[in-house]
Image (cartoon, rainbow, N blue to C red):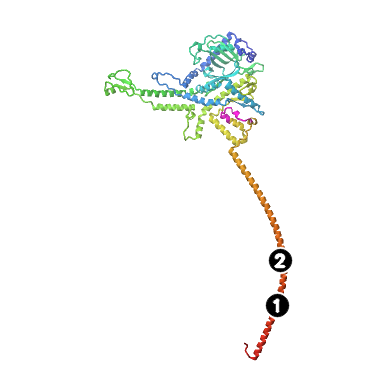
Amino acid sequence: MMNYDQADMQAQAEAPLPDTKPLASANLVEGLTEEEKTEIAAWCKTGFEEDLDSRGEWESNIDDWIALAKQTKEDKTYPWPGASNVKYPLVATAAMQFAARSYPSLVPSNHKVVTTTVIGKDPTGEKFEKAQRVSTYMSYQLLHEMSGWEEDMDKMLMMLPIVGTMFKKTWYDKTEDKVKSKLILPKNIVVNYWTTCLDESERISEVIHLSPRLLKERQNLGIYVDVDLGEAAPAPNLAPSDADNNASSLPYTLIEQHTFYDLDDDGYAEPYVITFDYNSGKLLRMSPRYLQKDLQLKDDGKVARIKPIQMYTKFGFIPNPDGSFYDIGFGVLLGPINESVNTLINQLVDSGHLHNLQSGFIGKALRVKMGDQSLRPGEWRPVNATADDLRKQIVPLPTKEPSSVLFQLMGTLITSGKELASVAEIFTGKMPGQNTPATTTMATVEQGMKVFTAVYKRIFRALSEEFYKVFELNSTYLDPNKYITVLDMEVGPEDFDSSACDVAPGADPNAASQQEKLMKAQGLMEMLQVAGPIFNPIKVLSRVLEAQEQPNWQELFSDEVIQSGQVPPPPPDPKMMAIQAKVQADQQKAAMDIQMKQAQMELESRDKAQKMAMESQAHAQKMQHQEQAAMIKSASDIQMANIFSAAERAKAQQGLVQKDQAHQQKMSQQKEAASSQNSKSKSGKPTK
């Protein structure tokens, strides 16, 4: 074995490569002897064949699952040549339903495939800005720079539910100076069937079918050593399914094995990528599978551990119940049910065919021409026999109509298969009953999506691993201050610091449908109205726009919002403005009315005060006049009283005098009368 020093291998792995021969310096095959090359290639081939044999039964079933999903047309000879061979699309429907639900969610229309999460505290916001740059650049990188990534995702989401396991390879291609990702079919990744995971596997072998032209091209670039592999020939169990027998079109079968090999004889196997031709057994390439930062040294400076570079990502559908490495899909779960449904359908069709086209025996005593006899609809053919002879000589075979029991059994199997695949009618877009409450429908959809959600989260986990591989490759190989013209931004390796941010797919593994995401966004908007200042309106609106998958929704925010980070007050409602204007006009009118009333009241008060003053003055004058008049009247009364008193006194005195005179006169008369009476009485004569 060649004596390789560990430091020399590290230097070769990390040395800058010339532009004219990008990968030549990393190929260790050029320093090996022919014996060492043969020994290494044979060792790798032995391990590859052991792994290939361990999964032989699983590999033989893949073609059956794919043929069942493709509904491949096959000729049948039982129970007779050309018998019915209908394929019911149970597996195909389940796979298409899964792909239709998962693809738009994992690759959203807003092109935000990658999201980032800030790790640790970020008081200045620097980590957040870095994370945003990483998210924007990686989304652009996957969809635009890594050609075929989205197409591979579409293909993988269609094949994964059928076969159960798919792989993607992520690596840095120095010939094109960019990170690349490629979908690899499960039959082309050979791992021991009982391997627990890729990171703990001793060997990961990729089967590469390479045309002579592409092989020569890689040899010219220095990727592979320039050796003669002879003519290409199909390898047993490894030939591509579309290969024909034309020798000029046959590809070479190369095995790229990611394994561990003790090249320097220090007792520790280092990680390498070894590529050899399967038919000729010739070694084409051997390169270290680690970087300087992947070395872990002991105290004495010797290598304690080397962390290998993992290029492959496994995408699993449902873990295999037997605990093996390869997951299962609808091919395993629905294959037997689908085969049973196909058998029942074909039996019903064949039964109907026999019943509609009857057959039987014709006696030789019947005088008709022997051979095949067929009658057109509406045709009556004369025969030289009586009706009784016809009934006796023609004996039809007993047949039955298609069995209703088989039909019911077929319906039961189809229903069972749909329940297993979560493709009930309500999930394929059909409306429920008219009287079905909306809450019942939503609960049914939610429960029916449980199986899908679990599988979806497994894909989400695997996709996170792939994104992290791209993240790590960018931190190592990305050009400093790479300017992205489309995005108007600069990114560099310093942005891809795993201690500052983490990457994840942009999809929500808990949201199984677009309607569910919109409902969550609507609920967030309703909470914003209630919570008020507790939530950040800009971030809430951003999540709502993302849920709606609005294209370039960042452009919808105004410059004022981008600069301030605050939502400006909403524009006034014309109706509210009219109401407010009316209220304001009413208020102004009321204020003017109040002012006018106040002025009027003030004028009235002044008038009243003036009137009262005038009335008071008039009253005072009147009182003065009345007082003067009273005084005059009093004086006049006094004078009159005095005059009256004097007159009265005079009158009274005169009256007294008159009374006294009258009294005296009366007394005089009475005396005279009395005297006269007395004189008469004395004479005795009556008085007249």
Task: Give the percent coordinates (x, y) of residue 348.
Answer: 40, 24
Q: How many marks?
A: 2
The front one of 77 and 675 is 675
Q: Quadrant of residue 356?
A: top left
Residue 310, visible in the rendered structure: no
Q: Which mark is residue 633?
A: 2
Q: CA distance from mark 2 to mark 1?
A: 31 Å
The front one of 599 and 89 is 599
Q: Residue at x 67, y 53 (%)?
A: 607
From this view, report whether residue 301 is shown above or below residue 580: above
Q: Is residue 366 magenta?
A: no
* Crowdedness near tag 1: few (<14), some (14–19) or many (≥20) residues, C-alpha within 10 Å: some
Q: Quadrant of the N terminus?
A: top right
Q: Which mark is residue 656?
A: 1
SS for callout 1? helix
Task: Give the percent coordinates (x, y) of residue 469.
Answer: 59, 21
The front one of 108 and 645 is 645
* Crowdedness near tag 2: few (<14), some (14–19) or many (≥20) residues, C-alpha within 10 Å: some
Q: Quadrant of the C terminus?
A: bottom right
SS for callout 2? helix
Q: Quadrant of residue 673?
A: bottom right
Q: Amino acid at mark 1?
A: Leu
Q: Amino acid at mark 2?
A: Lys
Stretch in magenta: 544-559
Residue 547, visible in the rendered structure: yes
* 327 left or right, relative to 567: left
